Image (cartoon, helix red, strand yellow):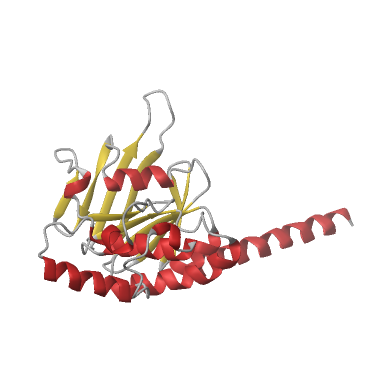
Amino acid sequence: MYVAIENVCFSYSRKSAAALDKFSLTIHKGEVISILGKSGSGKSTLLRLLAGLEKPEKGSFKIEDKVLFDDKTFLQPEKRGIGMVFQDYALFPHLTVAENILFGLFRLKKAEKKKRLQEVLELVELEGYGKRYPHQLSGGQQQRIAIARAIAPNPSLILLDEPFSNLDAELQEKIRKDLRDILKKADITSIFVTHDEKDAYVLADRIVKIQDGRINFIGRPCDMLDTYSQAALSSKETVAEEELVRI
């Protein structure tokens, strides 16, 4: 497995209930995973732990042979090689699109930066936008630039926090498929958290449904639809049986 998350536990205080309880998940390289759950389910906590913004109480997290945290190791966020796309995109308003994308590529030579900039702008289909500023872009375009910036350093994993929450419903429909196409073309392993089942169905290779810090479903989008269909059928059968009893 490319990514291995094993028995991760976390609480915000000793007295509070566990935000994550023995969370385990393995991910293949290039796979797009949705962490689906309501507010307070633990999905955003997981993202913060993987990014290195919180320290777990127990458990381990590995990408290939690299240990990011376990009982002996805790790598700081900047050493993890993980890209992050924030809910509000977090673009620097005083920098151009090109400057935003190149912000994390300070170790590359000038020619390498230029080449990588062109590659990611082509990937997100925004060639020719390099000299614009964030306020000159639509919400969907800002999201694409945030994704381009996250992809530019060739991270081993990308984390996306509620990627469509700032977009109107009509734009969400178009951007969902576009985002999946971008992630698949880049062949980057991705984890995104969402409360919206539509996001999960359209984007994810697999959906991980989480409730009260624990996983209660892992499977393909079609598997979740089958589960709902079976539950609905079972409910109808129960109602029918109750009606027969009354008769």
Q: Is residue 145 left or right of residue 52?
A: right
| Residue under the point 41% across and 71% down | 180
Q: Is residue 97 left or right of residue 73?
A: right
Q: x and y percent of residue 29 in the render? A: 26, 67
Task: Name the residue: 43% across, 27% down.
Answer: 16
Whole-percent x, y for residue 62 in the image: 20, 53
The residue that appears at 21% across and 56% down in the rendered structure is 104
User: For the point 28% across and 71% down, which residue is it?
Assistant: 120
In this picture, residue 92 sits left or right of residue 242:
left
Q: Which corner quadrant holds the C terminus?
A: bottom right
Q: Is residue 159 above or below residue 226?
A: above
* Camera-side residue of 175 and 116: 116
User: Can residue 220 be spotted in the picture?
Assistant: no
> Which of the pair 130/58 is nearer the observer?
130
Relative to 69, 148 lies left or right: right
Task: Decide: is 232 above or below 48.
Answer: below
In-front residue for pair 244/153:
153
Q: Quadrant of residue 119?
A: bottom left
**x, y percent for residue 102:** 23, 60
Quadrant position of the N terminus in the picture:
bottom left
Q: Report the residue that reaches farthest toward the top.
A: 15
Asked which quadrant contains residue 53, the reply is top left
Q: Position of residue 65 (x, y in %)?
A: 14, 57
Is residue 16 among the parts visible in the rendering? yes
The number of discs equals: 0
From this viewpoint, which residue is outermost toward the right?
247
